[in-house]
Image (cartoon, rainbow, N blue to C red):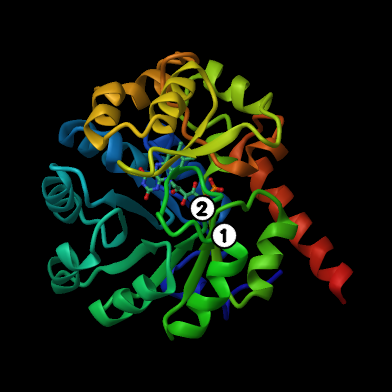
Amino acid sequence: MDWSTNRLCRLLGTRLPIIQGGMIYMSGARLAAAVANAGGLGLLGSGSMRPDLFRDQLRKCRTLTDRPFGVNVPLLYSHSAEILEIALAEGVRLFVTSAGSPRRAIGRLKDRGCTVLHVVASPALAVKCEDAGCDAVVCEGFEAGGHNGREELTTLVLVPQCVAAVTIPVVAAGGIATGAQWAACMALGADGVQIGTRFAMTQESSGHAAFKARVAAAAFDETMLMMKKHIPVRLLRNRFTERVAELEARGASRDELVELLGQGRARRGMLEGDLDEGELEIGQVSGMIGDVPTVAEVVARLEAGYAEAAGRLG
Ligand SMILES: Cc1cc2nc3c(=O)[nH]c(=O)nc-3n(C[C@H](O)[C@H](O)[C@H](O)COP(=O)(O)O)c2cc1C
């Protein structure tokens, strides 16, 4: 299918209106470059990288692809300002910001001629992004892996409301792993999709092999939105989430949750493969995923599935 007139493809300079979501401990140079080479927009996920590692990964990504790629910067981290400055100094001009107000970064990025997308979980926030000067919004339903909005809007409900609320391109995210799910989002009026979980489950993602094997075996009901009092996050159930659930059930305070969370749980689970005590961030759609193919294979399946779904609809 020819996407050359699609407004997201034109904005990003890609062949396909597909963004690989920035993902802590998953989306390093290898994944971002593979997605860029397959025709989508690859994103380096800076959230889990210290500044030096981030700079190295940026430079490595340049050696692996000559296609456009961007950087995801969750704005809640203390080092996000430094990450933004490194990215700008290294010539990055495409940013997907998340977890915070886009106003924290947009002035600086727009002054430097950057394209800026921001991740939202409600139509009200989508409007704020457009008002702030964002070029597009990524509208993420709470099926998604990783941190989520407290609103708990599903992609099917969120996306059409965002499409109605703003004039800038809308990128649907959350629960998209097949071509049919991608087509459904386009039917809702989205200009493209952002995909996390399916790309986390590829050869090129830097997640630990044990984490990927656990996700591949996950049933349809194994993820949960946890820690709504702290920062809501969708996790695969394990011993750690059982303890969080117990605390939440007896009305634990935010501080108690923060203490249990401690430091480095996400790294432990996703990068080091501690399946019992680590945080295993993954989307609801993991229940539909049972393998770990290459990025090229995933993108080929998405394209074939999209064509098939569009054909079915006539
Ligand atoms: C393991 C994992 C880590 C994630 N980390 C981030 C992150 O650092 N920054 C961010 O903006 N979104 C993050 N996300 C969300 C993704 O970028 C994407 O929007 C989401 O995964 C889309 O939903 P899906 O998982 O159903 O495809 C993460 C998702 C996963 C699965």
User: 255 or 41: which is nearer to us?
Assistant: 255
Q: In the displayed structure, would residue 161 be above or below residue 20?
A: below
**In the rendering, at what x and y percent does residue 130 appear?**
32, 79
Q: Amino acid at mark 1?
A: Thr
Query: In the image shown, does 292 or 63 lie closer to the viewer?
Result: 292
Which residue does the numbered mark 2 point to in the structure image?
Answer: 142
Dot 1 lies on which element? loop
Quadrant of the rendering where the C terminus is positioned: bottom right
Category of crowding for the residue at label 2, using alpha-carbon neighbours closer than 10 angstroms: few (below 14), some (14–19), many (at least 20): many
Q: Quadrant of residue 127?
A: bottom left
Q: Which mark is residue 62?
A: none
User: Residue 154: x, y in percent?
Assistant: 57, 59
Identified at 42% across, 50% down, the residue is: 148
Real-space Cα separation, disc 2 to disc 1, in angstroms: 5 Å
Q: Position of residue 89 (x, y in %)?
A: 13, 53
**Taking 158 as reference, is 45 above or below it?**
above
What is the number of the mark on residue 154?
Answer: 1
The reply to whether the C-beta atoms of the residues labelled 2 and 1 are less than 8 Å apart is yes
Question: Any atom of ligand 1 within 8 Å of the CB at mark 1?
Answer: no
Asked if residue 302 lies left or right of residue 151, the reply is right
- Residue drawn at point x = 52 percent, y = 20 percent: 238
**Residue at disc 2, CB closer than 8 Å to ligand 1:** no
Q: Quadrant of residue 277?
A: top left
Task: Check disc 2 and report its element: helix, strand or loop.
Answer: loop
The amino acid type, in three-letter code, at marker 2 is Phe
Q: Quadrant of ligand 1?
A: top left
Q: Is residue 160 left or right of residue 247?
A: right
Query: Horizontal and vertical percent for residue 240?
Result: 44, 19
Q: Which residue: 43% across, 34% down?
A: 26
